[in-house]
C-alpha cells in the first residue's frame, strides 16, 4: 500500500509542477527537436530527453514486472523487498518529475505513464488481497 501512495505522490508532484509552470509566463521559442528518437520503447514505456528520467522509467518497469511476478506467486517475502524498492523509486520519481517539469509535453507524458502504472499496481494489489 505504501508503494501505491508513493506513486500517487509522484503523480501529484508532477501535476503540481505542471500547474506552476502554467502560471509562470513563458517565452516563445522556435526551437525544433534535433533528434527523432522514438517516444515509446518496445515494452511500451515512454522515453524522455533526460537520461536520468529514462533510467527511472526503466527501473520502474523492472519494479512493476517484479511486482507482477510476486503477486502471481503470492511471494510475501518478495513483496516486502519490493516495499523497500518502491520507497527508493518514490524518491527517484520526485527527482524525475522535477527534471521534466520545465517541459510540459514530457511532464504530461510522465504523468500519464505514472497514472497508468499506479492503476496497474492497484489492480495487482486487488489480486493479491482477493478483492
Image (spheres, rainbow, N blue to C red):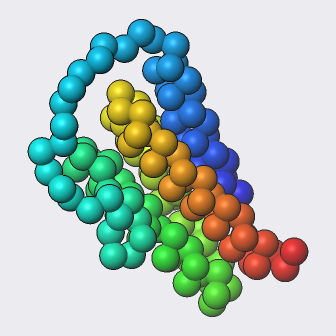
> In the rendered view of the protein, which quadrant contains the C terminus?
bottom right
Q: Quadrant of residue 101?
A: top left
Relative to 2, is 10 on the left or the right?
Answer: left
Residue sitting nearer the eye, 22 or 115: 22
Residue projecting furthest to the front = 30
Residue 46 appears in the picture as rendered? yes
Residue sitting nearer the eye, 99 or 49: 49
Residue 97 higher or lower than 83, as above or below: above
Q: Quadrant of residue 124?
A: bottom right
Q: Position of residue 2 (x, y in %)?
A: 66, 52
Task: Give the residue drawn at x 51%, y 35%.
Answer: 14
Residue 98 appears in the picture as rendered? no
Task: Give the residue drawn at x 24%, y 44%.
Answer: 50
Q: Position of residue 34 (x, y in %)?
A: 12, 45
Residue projecting furthest to the bottom = 73
Residue projecting furthest to the left = 34
Residue sitting nearer the eye, 93 or 75: 93
Task: Give the residue drawn at x 21%, y 26%.
Answer: 30
Relative to 47, is 2 on the left or the right?
Answer: right
Q: Position of residue 121 (x, y in %)?
A: 64, 65
Residue 24 higher or lower than 97, as above or below: above
Q: Position of residue 75 (x, y in %)?
A: 62, 83
Amino acid at each position: 500500500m505504501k508503494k501505491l501512495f508513493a506513486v500517487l505522490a509522484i503523480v501529484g508532484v508532477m501535476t503540481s509542477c505542471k500547474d506552476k509552470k502554467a502560471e509562470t509566463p513563458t517565452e516563445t521559442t522556435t526551437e525544433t527537436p534535433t533528434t527523432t528518437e522514438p517516444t515509446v520503447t518496445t515494452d511500451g514505456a515512454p522515453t524522455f530527453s533526460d537520461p536520468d528520467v529514462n533510467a527511472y522509467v526503466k527501473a520502474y518497469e523492472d519494479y512493476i514486472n517484479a511486482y507482477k511476478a510476486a503477486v502471481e506467486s503470492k511471494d510475501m517475502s518478495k513483496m516486502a523487498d519490493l516495499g523497500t524498492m518502491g520507497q527508493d523509486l518514490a524518491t527517484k520519481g520526485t527527482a524525475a518529475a522535477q527534471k521534466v517539469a520545465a517541459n510540459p509535453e514530457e511532464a504530461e507524458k510522465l504523468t500519464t505513464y505514472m497514472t497508468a502504472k499506479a492503476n496497474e499496481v492497484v489492480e495487482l494489489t486487488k489480486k493479491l488481497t482477493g478483492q
